[in-house]
Amino acid sequence: MSSYRLNNGRGARRLWAATLALALVLALDLLSGGALRSLARGAALPAWSAGSRIASAVSGSGFFSSRRALQEENDALKRELALLRVRAAEARVLRDEAEKLRALSGLAALTPGVAAPVVSSASGSPYGTFLIGAGTENGVANGDLVLAGNGAGGIVIGRVSEPGARRSLVTELFAPGARLEATIAGAPLEAEGRGEGNARAEAPSTLPVAAGDVVFSSHAGGRAVGLVGAIREEPGSAYKTVFIRTPPVSELGFVYVIPRE
């Protein structure tokens, strides 16, 4: 308790001393006719002038304007880089299309026909159909064969089912549920379409067939309609399952259309 009173007394004395000092300063300023305030302003003026000169020097040096110029230059470089990337992507697309068209050049040399771009992929259709960018105006007719440019003779992947003036609907040979008479290693068999370029067939277990063998069909003018992708055999079974594969439409930029046979 005595310690609290002692501290409280010291605080009161300090407050009185500060009050008296302030009163004394005010009294001196009044007695001097404001000379004390003028003296204080005079002492502060050099500091203010120095600060003003520094600000003017920084502004006059162009520091902030240079920074803005650098930012604008940086933004311009970013826009130019983005444009270059777009142009590089376009160049890659053009090179890819050129390579796919070159793959069809062998077919064009052997059989008259029409090269057509694939407009829509069969993977988006449950019916095993896709659109091509060619129609009756280009000489395309109902029943024409549609080939993928893979190899000298190509592989038949479908037939034109609904020709339009400039676009045509193509139905895959191996559309889901479709059945096609085919030949593997000289043996006739029936292939069942599974969609997206896949099919399967049951072959005698004694048939010498291997992955990579070509599958032909008389319904495609005796042309190739796919390749053997895999074989599944069950011990003791008289038959084995042959899985057939054609080039996926989604990976074909172009196809080649020839008259039906």
Image (cartoon, grey):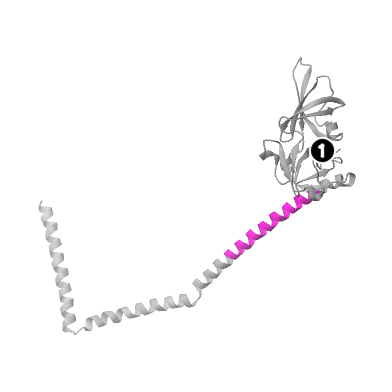
The residue stretch that appears in magenta: 75-101
Q: Residue at x 74, y 38 (%)?
A: 171
Magenta segment: does it hold 61? no
Q: Residue furthest right?
A: 110
**Figure quadrant of residue 38:** bottom left
Magenta segment: does it hold 85? yes
Question: Tag count in the figure?
Answer: 1
At which x and y percent is residue 59?
A: 46, 76
At which x and y percent is residue 67?
A: 52, 69
**Figure quadrant of residue 19:** bottom left
Say what amino acid the circle numbered 1 marks: Ile
Where the C terminus falls, by quadrant? Answer: top right
**Figure quadrant of residue 225:** top right
Q: Residue at x 37, y 80 (%)?
A: 49
Label 1 belongs to which residue?
155
| Residue in the foreground of this view, choosing between 6 and 56 | 56
Q: Residue at x 77, y 30 (%)?
A: 244
72 lies left or right of 170: left
At which x and y percent is residue 113?
A: 85, 46
Q: Main secondary structure of the magenta part?
A: helix
| Residue in the foreground of this view, choosing between 239 and 229 | 239
79 lies left or right of 117: left
| Residue in the foreground of this view, choosing between 107 and 236 | 107
At which x and y percent is residue 150?
A: 82, 41
40 lies left or right of 239: left
Q: How many residues crowd around disc 1 within 10 Å: few (fewer than 14), some, or many (20 or more)?
A: many
Q: Residue at x 51, y 75 (%)?
A: 62
| Residue in the foreground of this view, choosing between 23 and 56 | 56
